[in-house]
């Protein structure tokens, strides 16, 4: 945090820097912003008309614009990182599978009664146990398995590379060409009304959250072939898997063989939320 002193102070929060130092007072000697980074002196909190808790800095939103004044602190930073709208995209990948599937069909004159069998269709010859068929049967198309999976695609983070300099002349408080006289404080804080706020840090990164569930309208259709023996040797016709109520001509359910077709429908991916992080986050406010 910034101290309420008008002399030279310590600006950090970037790469371990700390903005302001409560131990610095107006009578102190010029202190480096962070000795480990070999940076120079800067005015203390409250100098140059800084709001309470803020320290004056020279700020440029282009690190290549110009160098800091001779002898002044120079820190290159990332400025206002932003995740674009499609930074984290979930694309839909589908490989629908209709088998295996438990056999369920409607019975009765209008096929309105659902009958659940103990037969699992697997594309081969599935023994039906020699049951007596109902007069009418309908088999409704059903959703496939593996019809929809997400693939997360991560885009690029948008940011600007800027530069922060210490203000060594605490009486003049002027900004050279290419810089603004602004005010900084550690962390994510609110700027005073009327000032433009910048989030800066030593580095930035973006994380994509997990995709929400995707959705698919794919359905399994095709035909169920009926055999009057248990080894699928003697075909007795087919029933379409289309939900229509069909008159059954067979008088014996010996075995079934399901030949599926897939209506791919549409596959819609889920969504993912991007989170932007700044290391050594610092707030810079410019008039």
Image (tube, rainbow, N blue to C red):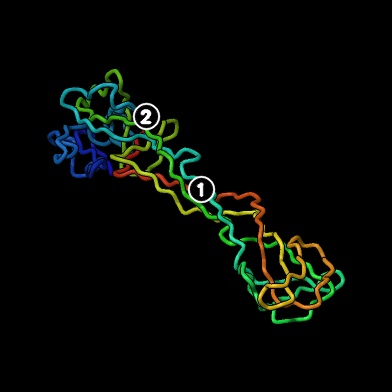
Q: Quick one: SS at disc 2? A: strand
Residue extending farthest to the top is 177
Q: Quick one: SS at disc 1? A: strand
Task: Point out residue 268 in the picture as x, y percentages from the top left corner.
Answer: 59, 49
Task: Point out residue 255 in the picture as x, y percentages from the top left corner.
Answer: 69, 75
How far apart marks 1 and 2 lie (CA) works out to 38 Å
Left or right relative to 109: residue 172: left
Which residue is found at the position 24% from the left and 29% from the top? 165
Which residue is found at the position 50% from the left and 39% from the top? 85
Residue extending farthest to the right is 109
Residue 228 lies in quadrant:
bottom right
**In the image, is residue 259 above or below residue 128?**
above
Q: How crowded is mark 2: few (under 14 residues within 10 Å), some or many (20 or more)?
A: some
Which residue is found at the position 56% from the left and 49% from the top? 269
Task: Point out residue 259 in the picture as x, y percentages from the top left corner.
Answer: 66, 62
Along the line of sight, the residue nearer the viewer: 96 or 13: 96
Q: Residues within 10 Å of mark 1 (few under 14, many from 20)?
A: many
Left or right relative to 75: residue 223: right
**Circle 2 residue:** 286
**In the image, is residue 78 above or below residue 141?**
above
**Circle 1 residue:** 90
């Amino acid at each position: 945090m910034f101290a309420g002193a008008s002399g030279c102070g310590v600006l950090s929060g970037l790469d371990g820097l700390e903005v302001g130092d409560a131990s610095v007072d107006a009578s102190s000697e010029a202190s480096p912003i962070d000795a480990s980074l070999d940076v120079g002196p800067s005015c203390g909190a409250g100098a140059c008309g800084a709001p309470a808790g803020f320290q004056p800095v020279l700020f440029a939103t282009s690190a290549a614009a110009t160098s800091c004044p001779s002898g002044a602190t120079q820190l290159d930073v990332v400025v206002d990182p932003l995740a674009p709208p499609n930074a984290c995209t979930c694309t839909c990948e589908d490989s629908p599978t209709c088998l295996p599937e438990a056999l369920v069909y409607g019975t009765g004159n209008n096929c309105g009664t659902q009958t659940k069998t103990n037969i699992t269709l697997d594309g081969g010859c599935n023994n039906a146990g020699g049951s007596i068929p109902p007069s009418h049967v309908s088999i409704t198309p059903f959703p496939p398995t593996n019809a929809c999976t997400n693939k997360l695609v991560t885009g690029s983070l948008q940011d600007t590379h800027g530069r922060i300099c210490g203000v060594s002349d605490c009486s003049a408080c002027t900004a050279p060409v290419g810089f603004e006289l602004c005010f900084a404080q550690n962390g994510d804080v609110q700027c005073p009304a009327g000032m433009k706020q910048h989030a800066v840090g030593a580095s930035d990164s973006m994380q994509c959250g997990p995709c929400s569930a995707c959705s698919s309208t794919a359905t399994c259709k095709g035909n169920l072939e009926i055999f009057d023996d248990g080894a699928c040797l003697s075909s007795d016709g087919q029933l379409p898997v289309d939900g229509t109520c069909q008159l059954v001509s067979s008088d014996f359910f010996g075995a079934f063989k399901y030949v599926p077709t897939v209506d791919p429908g549409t596959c819609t991916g889920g969504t993912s939320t991007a989170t932007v992080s700044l290391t050594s986050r610092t707030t810079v406010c410019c008039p």
